[in-house]
Amino acid sequence: VTNDFRLLAEETEEGEEGEESGDEKGASEDDVEMSIQPRSISIQPRCIPRCITDTPKRNAGPYTVIAFVNSASGGRMGDTLHTALQSHLGPSYVIDLHSCRPGNMPEDTLLQYALDPMVRVLACGGDGTCGWIFSSMDKVWSTVLGVKSTRSRVHQSKYKDHLPLAIMPLGTGNDLSRQYGWGGEFQSHMKSKSMITAVQTSKIVKLDRWRCIIMSVKEMTDEEKECIPKILAESSTDDSLMMDNEDDDDYTRRATVDTLHSLLDDGDINYEPKNSQSPKKSKKKEPAIPPETQLFDGVFCNYFSLGFDAKVAYLFHHERELHPERFTSPLKNKIIYGEKIPYCLKGPKLSKYCKVLVNNEKGQLVRLKIPKSCRAIILMNIQSYGGGHRLTACGCAADSLIEVIFVSNAMRLGACFVKPSTSFSLLKAAAQTNNVCIRTRRPLHCEVDGEPWLQGEGVMQIKFHSRNSILEKTKVGGLCGCMGGGAEEAVIQ
């Protein structure tokens, strides 16, 4: 924890030096390897050789399509799909992610095509696979743009429409695929040429991505805790909200640091020690896994959640790891998922253990009051949650804002799953912001794009990271390309 935290602190200090030297596009952070998987953070720079090739072969009409297949997704479909795509695109244009090794990673392939505006990328897998490809693109654009930062600001460069991503859904929830019209689950006719045609005819749109930093305060020394406000303040005053007056900007930064110092003050959190609560017998014990205490630094596309809904996902994933033979179909998965909900109905009320700060419209960090009945905090970037359900009426996946939603219980969250959605069933967003800071005073379950874990008490920050190009499927003649126009495959609007 100490070594990772010091590297993060050094990143902030070097970022300030970069701003003073007038780095182009405001890039000021070190190259940080990001992963949505907890406990797998790596903060070592990765050197990628610059080897851009000439115009590649067009294997999909006017375009070149590069397909990445996660053979570990979709049951036994990986090998079959890999062979089918090779027949449509050519063997050299289909990469199996399961066989990637250092020197043969996705970024090594993508770098060869980064300067060609007629190249499109097809990710065959779940939301985690899409996140992996986007993180690889971060490294590619850092190399192409000649900056150290993985926050490469490619959307502000001439390459903003390069390497757009299409999706073939092989995962469980497939929320990102649903959001952009590619469907909620794999269909057999996706192996046909019609899928490649759908990639050709799709249109380029944008997707915001968000960086999540979690620091376990309990494991830090007093000296390290003093660095937290400075680290978080570095990005709390985002450059998209900078004022023209430099004096006002300096004042805002100082005020932000002062506000973040209050985040570490636990005097106004009604924290109750665990041993003060009356013990209650449970029919089934939770998995005895200690809370995570390592530094977490990752990027997500869909959503971040904290509380009872993340606990449901956590119990579900733990059960699947113990008994994979029970998870043999989407229907069985949903039944098992529903069995976990009763164990999480009486989750802790987060107003007792959490404090939330958000940026307001002026870029100032202010405190957001948590309702007393709140048992979950969900930060939504896209409009698809839990397998294609919309939680709130507001929000856009490319507005540099994330919606902060407070949920009281599973019954209220379940109302959003009723089709069709109405203004009464949807939740109200407590805030729309580009920066969220959360202080927790007890271990709580977290979830990032479907990956859950138990997080120890600490400080969290979710901030705007970058905006990437993504392909939205177009409908032809009222039908949805290779998906056959199934209404159940689309996110509820």
Image (cartoon, rainbow, N blue to C red):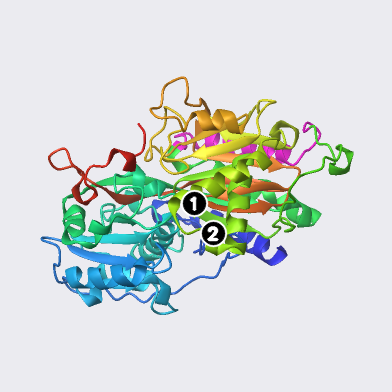
Tell me the amino acid under the disc marked 2: Arg
Look at the numbered discs 2 and 1 and tell me whether their residues touch, using CB distance below 8 Å: yes
Q: Is residue 361 visible?
A: no
Q: Main secondary structure of the magenta part?
A: helix
What's drawn in magenta, residue-wise?
241-269
| Of callouts 2 and 1, the N-terminal one | 2
Tell me the amino acid under the disc marked 1: Lys
Q: Where residue 123 sits in the image (x, y, percent)?
A: 33, 60
Q: Please, is residue 480 above or below residue 244 in the view?
A: below
Pick whichever, 442 or 34, lies toward us: 442
Name the image quarter holding the C terminus.
top left
Regarding mark 1 in the picture, which secondary structure is present there?
A: helix
Q: Where residue 445 sits in the image (x, y, percent)?
A: 65, 47
Q: Where on the picture, by quarter, is residue 199?
A: bottom left
Residue 265 among magenta residues: yes
Give me the residue at 68% from left, 67% from top.
3
Q: Is residue 222 visible?
A: yes
Residue 332: image tag: 1
Regarding mark 2 in the picture, which secondary structure is present there?
A: helix
Q: Which residue is mark 2?
A: 326
Q: Where on the picture, by quarter, is residue 111?
A: bottom left
Q: Where residue 130 sits in the image (x, y, percent)?
A: 39, 57
Pick whichever, 315 or 143, lies toward us: 315
- 205 relative to 64 in the view: left or right: right
